[in-house]
Amino acid sequence: MSTSPPEHLAGAVLSIDLDAVAANYRTVLKHLGGVPSAAVVKANGYGLGADKVAPALAAAGCSVFCVAHVGEGVALRGILPDAEIHILNGFLPSAAEAYAEHRLIPSLGSLGEIAGWKTFCGDSPLPCNIHVDTGILRLGLPPGELTAIADDLSMVDGLDVRHVMSHLASADETGSAQNHQQLAAFRKARAILPMGKAWFANSSGVFLGSDYHFDLARPGVALYGVNPTPDAANPMTGTVRLSARIAQIRDAQPGETVGYGATHKITEPTKIATLPVGYADGYLRSLSGTGSGTIDGIPVPLVGRVSMDLITLDVTDVPEAKRQPGQWVELIGPDNPVDAVAAAAGTIGYEILTSLGARYHRIYERNRA
């Protein structure tokens, strides 16, 4: 699932701490207070490599995994032959045989999907989930279809329902009234659909309290170090470090400009470092003029636009010995956490992680002494 050029052929190195991923899973379990937890490894393990993070999570005790698409489920089955694997994006009729062949559990979110799954299974029910929409208006049974089931329970007869699930829309906003509204709606849905286990809390939902935990949680981004509680300190451990070597140093004089569009004008003698990272690597163009890195803890602001393959940083304040070609610059890491990078880009940590490109040399760290 993940590709990585050799270090000597790559312009930057992405280090992924699998011990931190496992530690974050244990942190989630601690907050769940005895309720078990699945792990969401969709989007190639949120960009970190599902082939590496899923086994690390399994070694930490996780046995239930979630992906978005059936194709992801097929790939994950090859990695985790004994895991329980759920497909969050529903039932894809054109891929029906794949669910059975690879023991994948679809999350049925409409009367049409329920009917289609029952037809496919025939007299031999296969495991499934029923997904109820409690207010996010994406996937899941809408209120009218849930009412139709309440009026005619034969619609769900013969299903082997493992979980009844829903998804929180505003769990990262602890004061949002929508959380309470969705919780109430989910409880009403469970009264209509009491079969299987109740499955509700996502990453931020885990931290909303025990009312949201039910029988099983399914965190995703928190496992990879993104803060699930944006209004408080991050309870999770960072999992990634992105570093690039300086390719070239330029002396810039007042009146000169940097990069495409001449968006940054030099006003005093400046040292400009060019790094071989750009938006083709997932270093977002929206970081133009707002991003930064560090050299031995010294902040170095990004100046000018992010281009496809290169960025430029002002390293004037860095001692000369540490601003030479070949010097490492940290772009994501302890000095510049993924949430800080996301804030500078005007986005969220999810996008930063899932955008991480294939041109980085990847190092997976495990069991460090």
Image (cartoon, rainbow, N blue to C red):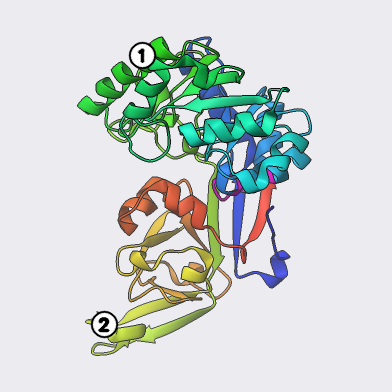
Q: Secondary structure at mark 2?
A: loop
Label 2: how many residues lie within 10 Å, few (<14), some (14-19) or many (20+)? some
The residue located at (64%, 48%) in the rendering is 94
Q: Is residue 286 magenta?
A: no
Give the structural element (helix, strand or loop) at label 1.
helix
Percent across and percent down for residue 367 are 71, 34
* Residue 15 position (above or below residue 188): below
Residue 270 vs residue 30, the one in the foreground = 30
Looking at the image, residue 149 lies above or below residue 46:
above
Q: CA distance from mark 2 to mark 1?
A: 60 Å
76 vs 231, left or right, is right
**Residue at label 1?**
187
Q: Is residue 49 magenta?
A: yes
Going by the numbered disc 2, the residue's amino acid type is Ile
- The residue closer to the viewer here, 193 or 249, is 193
Asked if residue 292 can be seen in this view, the reply is: yes
Residue 216 can be seen in this image: no
Image quadrant in which you'd find residue 258 = bottom left
Left or right of 302, for residue 11: right
Amino acid type of the residue tagged 1 in the rendering: Arg
Residue 162 spot, x, y in % from top left: 59, 19
Which quadrant does the C terminus fall into?
top right
Instruction: Identify the residue shown where x is 60% and y is 70%.
Output: 11
First reached walking from the N terminus: tag 2 or tag 1 = 1
Picture coordinates of residue 160, whole percent (x, y): 63, 19
Q: Magenta part of the protein: which range?
A: 44-52
Between 132 and 287, the one lying in front of the other is 132
Question: Seen in the image, is 200 located left or right of residue 5?
Answer: left
Residue 125: x percent and y percent? 68, 22
Q: Is residue 238 above or below residue 7?
A: above
Residue identifier under label 2: 266
